[in-house]
Amino acid sequence: MSPAETYEVEFLDAEVVEAPRLPARVTPFPDEALASWLLRFADPFGVSPKALLLGDGEADLATHPEWWRKPDPLLIAAVARSTGVSDDDVRALTFADWPDDGRDDALPERFSRQRFTVERPARQPRRIGVCPDCFAEDDIPYVRRTWTLGWLAACPIHGTVLVRVCPDCGKKLRLPALSSRDHFAPDRCPHCAFRLARTSTRAAPEPVVRFQQHVLSGRPKGIVDLPEVGVLAWPVAVALFDVLLGTVWIDTKPVGRDRLFTRIARDLGAEPFGEIADAYQGLAILTWMLEAWPMRAQAALAILGAVRARRQMQRWPSLDTDVHAQVEALLLTIWPDQQHPAGRAWWREWIESLPETGDDLRAQAARERLPHRRARLLALADVRDGLPVVVAAEAAGVIARTIYIWLRHGAANGLDAALERPRWLYLTEPQVMELAAWIAAAPPDGPRWRSNRVQGEALRRFGTEISINVADRLLRRHGPWRRRKVLKKRRFSVAPVYD
Ligand SMILES: [Zn+2]
Ligand SMILES: [Zn+2]
C-alpha cells in the first residue's frame, strides 16, 4: 500500500468518528428495501433520510428517482458510513448486484395487460405491491425489497396476490420519496390511511407461486431456468414472456380471451380472473402456458384464433436482433408454418371431404344448444382448419384419443355421429358417489386439486374418460376447500382538521 493510500484510509476513518453519532441503531429486516430501511431510520429524527444520511456531494448521486434500487457504490459507502452498517449489508437491501439495468424490474405491473395495449405507460416511480398477510405479522411494518419488483405477482412467503392499489381510495401504492419528512407508516395507504393489513386477500394458486419462484431465483444470476423450455438469459426470457402475452392481448377478440381465461383459471384451480388484467393474471397465463410447453401455448393460439408465430414476431421489431432471433426460434419449433406430413392420417380424408369449412362448423357450434355437441364442433373445426389433433385436443380440454374417437365415428357414420355422446363418457351413480367421497376426503388445508387429477382418477378407477367440465363440477361440488375468508373492510377515517 502506498503512503498516499494509507493517508486516504485514515482520512475516511477520521470522518466516521466526527460524524454525528446516531442514538438509535435500526437494523434492517429480512428482505427489506433500502428505501424502507432509510425511511424507518430517519423517522424518529423528523428529517428526511436524504438530509439525515447523505452529505451534499452524495445527494447528487441520488438524483435518479430509483437510485435506491441500483445505487452507485459511492452512495452505498456513504449510507454505510452514516448508519454504521456494513457496505455488504446495505448492498443486500438493493438490486445492485443483479445484472442488466433493471428496467424490467422497475416498471410497475410489468406483465399486466397495460404493457400490451397502452403506448406509453405512466412511469410513476416507487410503485410497490404489498402483502397484507406480511403486514399483519409485522411488529414493525416494513416494505420488502421483492415487493418493489414490477413483475412480482404474489408474496413469496404467503402466496397472497400483492395489493398494488388501495382498496379504499383506489390510489396506487407508492413508497414515499427519500426527501419526505412525513411519518413512515408503510402499512397504511399514504392517501387515506386505510390499514392495508385489513385488506381482503386473494391466494395465488400454487403453480403460479412456483413459477414466480423459478423466475425470482434465477433473476440475480441473470437467467430464467424454465424446466420445460431450458435456461434462458433474462432478456430472452422477458422477450419470450412478452411475445406469449402479446399473442393473448394484441388483436384478439374478447370471446376468445374469455374462453382462454376460463380454461386457465380452471386448470390452475384459481378463482376467475375478473376484470382487472394485472401482473398476477399475466404470470398466471405464463404459468399455464409453460407448465405444459409447448402444448398449452399452441392451444392458446388455437383458442384465441391468433396469427402464426412468424407473424407474432413481426409485432416486436424493436427487440434486440439476437433476442428476437432466439425467441422466434423457440416459437417456430412449437408452431411451425403449417404443412401436412407425407404419410397423411387416415381421418384427414374424411374431415377434408366435409362440405362444411372450419368457419361453418364454428357457426354451427354457435347455434348448438347442447354443450357436448358444441365442444365437438369447435374441436372438429380446428382439425378441419389443419390444426394437429393434439393441439385441437388441448384447446378443447380433452385428450387426443378422445378426438380420434370422434373422428372415427365421423369417418364411419358421418358428422352427426361424431357429435353424439357415447355411453362411456358417463359415470354410473355409484361411481359418482365413490369419486365424490374420494374428493371430499382431500386435505382441506392443502392446495385445491385440479380437474385433470379427477379425470385421471376416473380413468384409473373405472376406465372412463370424463370431460374436464364434469371433473371441474365434481371438484366444486364435493371439494373441501373454501374460498379464502374475506375480512370485512374497515374504514379508517382521519379526524377533521380545524385551524
Ligand atoms: Zn406475505
Ligand atoms: Zn387509500
Image: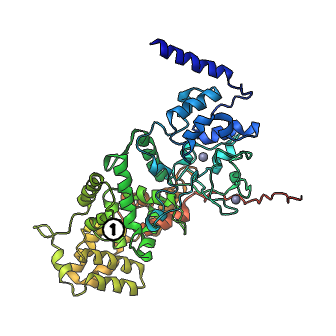
- Looking at this view, is 29 or 295 the one in front? 29
Tell me how the rendering is colored. rainbow
- 36 relative position to 95: left or right: right
Residue 460 locus on image (x, y percent)? 37, 57
Residue occupying the point 39% across, 84% down: 366
Q: Do we see residue 136 in this rendering?
A: yes
Tag 1, which secondary structure?
helix
Depth order, front residue of 364/182 = 182
Q: In the image, what residue occupies the spot 35% across and 56% down?
A: 240
Locate residue 290, reporting x and y percent. Answer: 37, 55
Asked which quadrant contains residue 389, the reply is bottom left
Name the side, left or right, on which 497 lies relative to 282.
right
Q: Which residue is mark 1?
A: 301
- Which image quarter is the N terminus in? top left
Asked if 420 appears above or below 247 in the picture, the reply is below
* Residue in front for this viewpoint, 414 or 434: 414
| Picture quadrant of residue 293 | bottom left
Residue type, numbered disc 1:
Leu
Residue 398 appears in view: no
Q: In the shown orientation, is residue 240 left or right of residue 440?
A: left
Residue 243 percent coordinates (x, y)? 36, 61
Q: Residue at x 50, y 33 (%)?
A: 73
Farthest right residue?
Answer: 499
Q: Residue at x 39, y 87 (%)?
A: 367
Residue 374 location (% of width, % of height)? 38, 80
